[in-house]
Amino acid sequence: MRLYTQGGDCRKLPTGPKSRVCALGIALLTTFPPAHAQRPLDVELLSTLSSLPHSQTAAAACVIDLRTKQTVFDFHADRPLIPASTSKLFTMAAGLAELGPEFTFETLFATDRQNLYVIGDGDPGLGDERLARQRNENVDTVLHQWSDAALAHGVTTLPGDLVIDESIFDDQRIHPSWEPADLGKWYAAPVGGLNFNDNCVDITVHPGPRPGDPVLVSVTPDAPIVEIINECRTGDGTPLLHHPPLTTTYKITGRCNKTWPFGSVAFPDPGALFADALRAMLARRGVILQGHIRRARVRQAGGEPPSALTILGRHRTPMTDVLARIGKNSQNLFAECLLKRAGYRWARRHGHSDPAGSWAVGANAVAEMLNRAGIVRDGLVVADGSGLSRDNTCTARQLVELLTWASAQRWAAVFHDSLAEAGSDGSLQKRLRDAPGHVFAKTGTMRGVRALAGYVDDDRGPRYAFAILFNNYPGPSTPYKRIQDDICRALIDVEPASNR
């Protein structure tokens, strides 16, 4: 479902220096009442936004004082623009509103003494390298743990299959509006009801003993389903990785004289990747399945597993871990899984007979949250959960009103602390290092788009909610990042009117 009613098209905005000056003059006349026209904050922010380096750039900004709930700055705040990853704020808030901060994703490993079962919960954290490192674990620790659990329950040889249940989500793993050039990249990994290693494979090549020998290839996760075609030889040169999107084939060519990690590359079938890696681990540990890997609906209508199954293991990822990966690291898969999982809960709550998390029902969860918050949805399009789709649009005012509403919810601190802290961590680690502890925000970047939305704190906590969006600029985004940082500094430094 697309949440779109009316609003401007950011790709059809007037261009040229005259139109920009005209728009700026209108903003001066209509945005600020005469009584407030000379307030230092207004003047400072407007001065910063009036120096855009490209005339065709579409800009919008909005600031709300969280203590007075008054809009203290408004620059084309109702203009719909592409938000990039700042749209994750809608996903994070909808996840918290629908599921609650105490929610935990839980993947089950079970048996009926004939088959083994893995019942997915849409958990994006299963085998996530960053979360595993935080727990002093490896990506495949869960595979070891479940193999140990099977052996502890006397499971060594079973006549049946490894059955995976991904029915918590629909079968659409790739959003139709994601750009073809992104497919196969780690940040456009497919979305499944059962996920592992961020639904990617990590391939590293190592030189062989002698020049001309084939290189050695290591793959994580260790799953036979990953087809490696090794045509790379030891010697001076550069190794190359070829991966046609949506295939299981990874071809390596060129030459290599040192260890060379290619990094994460998307795998097209997340459930199959996890099941194949688990079966291989079970076999190495002495647990033999005589059957095959197959998909089946195991979860009952109410969402619970059948009572006849013996639960051998559980993998849990708390909401706080998922939110931090979204808000601080801008991890797209985590955002898509959270949106679909919130959609699954929304569908169940609204009486769907056979609910499954999807982008459409996730958008419904966002819409219901915004209605409850009293936020007008004109110009809003929720296409996906991460902001990777260029079909997403929103206004600066909608982002700021969402942030303002979130700051008054019981989970406000969880939401706030999940955002990147400027100068400290996440996507803002290298920005605003001169203002530690003041800016907590979500970044958004794609070609021609630079966005930033979040909170500016003072000694008493969150003081302002802000959003700054730029679209349609040519070339690098560095000048627009600098403008965003200058606006944040102005919000940090200004003496609020309510304190005068």
Image (cartoon, rainbow, N blue to C red):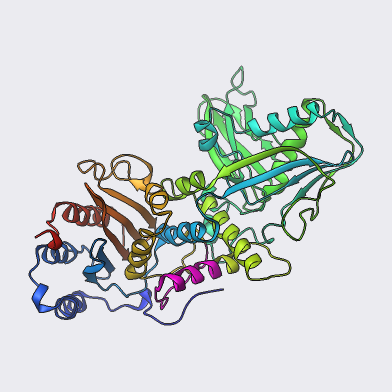
Q: Residue at x 69, y 70 (%)?
A: 352
Magenta residues (range): 363-384
Drawn side of residue 183 relative to residue 393, left or right: right
Instruction: Please state the horizontal and vertical placement of residue 22, each as a whole percent of the image.
Output: 17, 80
Q: Residue at x 50, y 67 (%)?
A: 366
Above/below status of 491 relative to 134: below
Residue 473 visible in the snapshot: no
Drawn side of residue 30 relative to residue 423, left or right: left
Q: Residue at x 57, y 35 (%)?
A: 254
The count of marks equals 0
Instruction: Please state the horizontal and vertical placement of residue 150, each as a whole percent of the image.
Output: 79, 31
Instruction: Identify the image quadrant of the C terminus.
Output: bottom left
Residue 309 is one of the magenta-drawn residues: no
Instruction: Please state the horizontal and vertical placement of residue 32, each as a whole percent of the image.
Output: 16, 75
Specify the farthest residue to the bottom: 6
Of 160 and 455, nearer the camera is: 455
Instruction: Identify the image quadrant of the N terminus.
Output: bottom right
Of 442 and 101, nearer the camera is: 101
